Image (cartoon, grey):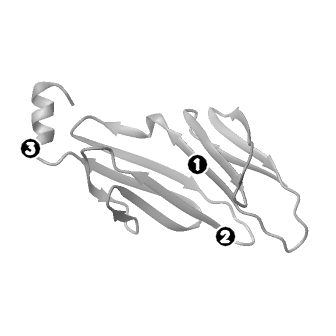
Amino acid sequence: MHVSTFCAASCLLERFSRDGEVGPSGSEVELSHRVYSTVLRLPGGAETRLSYAWSVEDAWSGDGVRGVYRLAVLGQTTIRPTELRIGIRVPEGMVVARATPGMRIEGDRVSWEGHAVGLMRFEVEFVDPLPGGVWRTLVGSG
């Protein structure tokens, strides 16, 4: 089986593992998206777990006072639904103003776990609590 995982063109793969074992994943570009591919050989009834950890530099849009992180995931139809776990770190000095329903906010992390089904969109808005954000904007250090 050939498995390809697509990401934004600016996506940087930080870690790939199969069943907890860190290993390589090929990288290419297709239709302006980065594609990480691997080949799997599984006997009937077997299962494996692939894990990708990546960062996307331009996924954030905003300034020193507020910003929004957006993520779109397209789940594929499979016999067993694909498990999806998302973890987002809150930028230093910011708090979460809102998040897509179903996302959990715990300290400096926002997370979601479930099955990847169809096109799923996630959004988290961060703000700098007053008065620090306003002050940084006025003095130009934000």
Q: Quadrant of residue 137?
A: top left
The residue wearing badge 3 is: 131
Residue type at numbered disc 1: Ala
**Residue 106 or residue 8, whichever sits in front:** 106
Q: Residue at x 87, y 63 (%)?
A: 42
Contact, CB < 8 Å: mark 2 with mark 1?
no
Indicate whether 33 appears above or below 94.
above
Proximity of marks 3 and 2: CB atoms separated by less than 8 Å: no
Q: Quadrant of residue 114?
A: bottom right
Q: Earlier in the sequence, mark 1 or mark 3?
A: 1
Q: Secondary structure at mark 2?
A: loop
Residue at the image position 24 percent from the left and 35 percent from the top: 64
Q: Gap in Å between the C-alphas at discs 3 and 2?
A: 45 Å
Disc 1 marks which residue? 53
Q: Which residue is mark 2?
A: 81
Q: Residue furthest top?
A: 140
